Image (tube, rainbow, N blue to C red):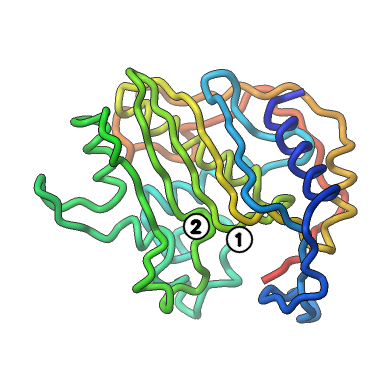
Amino acid sequence: MSYADEIFKANIKDILESGFSDEKLEVRPRWADDNSPAHTIKKFCIVNRYDLSKEFPITSLRYTNFKAAVDEILWIWQKKSNNVKDLNSHIWDSWADANGSIGKAYGYQLGVKHTYKEGEFDQVDRVLYDLAHNPQSRRIMTNIYAHQDLHEMNLYPCAYSMTFNVSGETLNGILNQRSQDMLVANNWNIVQYSILMHMLAQVSGLKVGELVHVIADAHLYDRHIETAKEVINNQSYNAPKLIIDTTITSFYDFTVDSFALENYEYHKLGKKLPVAV
C-alpha cells in the first residue's frame, strides 16, 4: 500500500467514525442540481506529513487526474492567472464571470508585486530569490488570503498559505488549508503542492523533503459518504515513480509535459460525484 493511500484511508475513517455533523445547522454550500443545503461531516485540524524523497503521494484508491492537477498549479503559481481561459480544465468554470475571471483570487494574489529592501518582487519571485540567496531564512512564505480583496474574489482561497523551510540542502514545506473537500480535492491538492515542492527544489539546487498539509476543516459532503466508504475499501497499489525533466533550471520553463508518472495504477470512481458550490 502506498503511504498516500494509508493516510487517505485513515483520514476518511476518522471523519466517518468520529466526525462532527452539521446536518442540523445553517450552511453556506448548496447542491448544484437542486440548491438544497450541502451538509458535511468534518474533523477539525487534520495534519498529514509526506516525505517526498521516499515516494510521490498520489492515491491509487481513487484516480487523481495528474496532468490536470499539474496544469492548475502552474496556472496559479507560474502563470499567476485568475482567468479560466488560461486553464485547460473546466474545474473553475462555476466561479468564473462572463469574461472568465474568478476575481482577485489565487494566481492574481501571487502576481501582486510588493516592495522589499532588495527591490520589488511578487510572492513567487520572492520565494525564488530567498531560496537562491538566503535559504536558511525563516521568512520564506506566501499568503493569498488577502482580506482587503476578499470582496472581489469569486471564491475565498481554500489552500491559502505555503511556508518553506530549508534544512541544510533539503527543502521542506507546510501547506495551510482552511477547508478541504476530502473525497474530491484532498489528493488533488497534495499532488499539486508536491509538484510545486519538486519544482522549487530543482531550480534552487536543493533536495526535496517533507510536505506537511494542515487542514482546518476536513470534511465529507453528505452525498459523498457512500462513495467514500467504497473508495477506502478498494485495493491499494504501490506508489508510482515521478519522472521530471531534470534539464530545467528556471521555474518558468516547466510545462505540464515536464512531469510524468511511471506505473501509476488506480481505481476510477464508478459514478460522477454531485457538486456542491
Question: Residue 97 placed where, x, y %?
Answer: 50, 78
For disc 1, the marked residue is 91
- Image coordinates of residue 231 in percent, x first then y, are 84, 42
Alpha-carbon span between mark 2 and mark 1 = 9 Å
Numbered label attached to residue 135: none
How many neighbours does mark 2 have within 10 angstroms: few (below 14), some (14-19), or many (20 or more)?
many
Kind of residue indicated by mark 2: Leu
Q: Quadrant of residue 32?
A: bottom right
Q: Is residue 270 left or right of residue 119?
A: right
Q: Which residue is mark 2?
A: 87
In which quadrant is the N terminus drawn? top right
Residue ID at (34%, 27%):
166
User: What x and y, as percent, mark residue 249?
Assistant: 30, 28
Cβ–Cβ below 8 Å for labels 2 and 1? yes
- Say few, some or many: other residues with alpha carbon within 10 Å of mark 1 (under 14 / 14 to 19 / 20 or more): few
Query: Does 238 appear above or below 50?
Result: above
Residue located at (26% from left, 28% from top): 136
Residue 151: quarter of image: bottom left
Q: Residue at x 40, y 33 (%)?
A: 199
Dot 1 amino acid type: Ile
Residue in the foreground of this view, choosing between 14 and 202: 14
